[in-house]
Amino acid sequence: MSKFYVTTSIPYVNANPHIGFAMELMYADVLARTARLRGSEVIFSAGTDEHGGKIAERAAEQHQSLKQYTDSISARFLELTKTLNISNNRFIRTTDQGHIKRAALIWAQLKKDIYKDKYEGWYCTGDETFYTETEVKANGGICPNHNRPYEKIKEENYFFRLSLYTDTIYDAINSGRFRVLPDTRRNEILSLLQRGLDDISVSRPKDKIDWGIPVPGDNSQVMYVWFEALMNYITVLGYPENDDFRQFWPADAQVIGKDILRFHAAIWPAMLLSLGLPLPKLLCVHGFVTADGKKMSKTLGNVIDPFDVVETYGVDAFRYYMLRHIPSQDDGDFSWQKLNNVYNSELANDLGNLVQRTIAMALKYFDGVVRFVPGAEHDTTLYSEALDNCRFDRALEVIWEQIRGLNQYIDEEKPWEIAKAKDMEHLNEVIAYLISSVGEIADLLTPFLPDTADKIKQAIGKERLSPIEGTLFPRRDA
């Protein structure tokens, strides 16, 4: 059996889950479910990033211990995976003892490319990131993400020889051996690589940041949170000795947001090359999600809680909106009004109406027993190509073209008039074609709307069709 390994990024636990990460989980889930349908054994990993100065700040603000704070927020992310029907079978926390132990092993393996040096420059605790003089000046000395001044720091840290691997990473991405999708992100990272990569600081003094994994052999330093967090993709597999690591690495797909492209398309590949490991096969990069055309913020009061959306519209309606109406490889917008419109027109009317009408006619005219007629299968090449290129919106568009076509087929054939004419042979052909086509649609929907697909399959997947209990997607008022 072939192996398939897919990961999401691991979000920082400085806040509760937001809608953008909910979307990332859905993307990875579609890839994992598709791989299983294609016959692969799948490891699908998600998790949380829990070290660094920002976490210590947030815990203090909440008057909680670091353990209390990280436990509570990480639990919320784990709950989100269950609420969204995400099929991950691994959930890693960077405070897990297994990760801490294996991170120390990785550091030891990277030591040939690590050296100690003095650093003087700019830092933002909110981003847990170092910035150049040019970047700081361009932003007027204020971090635009957190509306706080950059800190000028002078300290002695450990550095990783990132510069050594610039050309190798460039060649891997440029040749397609390491695919970065979409092309806009591929071109962005290639441009960065062409300018050359500088060595990066990979530790902080313990007296500045205490909440982190100690540097092996030097308890005065802790690993820089971003450097250590990237290790999770192999520590979760049991690097270096576990069978899962040997069988599943390299990752078949890693799903991330565009804001962390540099870490995953430059720093992470360099770490892997230093370890003598192959690079991931695919980096699937998504954009940001706004709310009614505006960036989400607590100040504006427009932050969308994914749990609220599921509670109001159900998990499959939420999955459908995010997977089809947010561009898979660009920024997109969430709107409660648009969600309601999409729910009624595309889920309740297009899909729900097709399934309900088909089953109702099979029950009415043939008591649910319809003779199979071959030849109903449609060409799914475009659907498969879309999935292989992380274009989830396009894959769903292919499905909806079939759904609309079948609704049109019903309107044109008018089975009720064929029944009146008592042409039962032709009527059987029409209903059988519809049932076969609806079954195919259920199969295609399985990675996207698993609960809905299961309901359809259960209704039509037996010798005698059975009605779906209730309405697939009851219409809703705005």
Image (tube, rainbow, N blue to C red):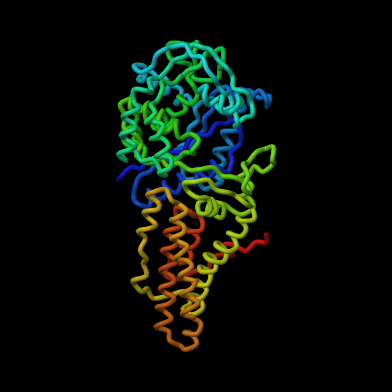
- Where is the N terminus found, in terms of image quarters? top left
Say if 354 sits above or below 290 in the image. Answer: below
Q: Nearer the viewer, residue 263 or 349?
A: 263
253 left or right of 349 in image: left
Q: Name the residue: 59% across, 33% down.
A: 73
Residue 266 in percent (x, y) is at 40, 30
Residue 342 in percent (x, y) is at 58, 59
Q: Name the residue: 42% across, 17% down.
A: 159
Say if 118 sits above or below 261 in the image. Answer: above
Q: Is residue 43 visible?
A: no
Residue 193 in percent (x, y) is at 38, 31
Q: Name the residue: 44% across, 66% down.
A: 402
Q: Nearer the viewer, residue 4 or 132?
A: 132
Say if 284 sits above or below 234 in the image. Answer: below
In the figure, residue 190 lies in which quadrant?
Answer: top left
Identify the residue at the far bottom of this view: 421
Residue 298 in percent (x, y) is at 67, 37
Q: Name the residue: 38% across, 52% down.
A: 37
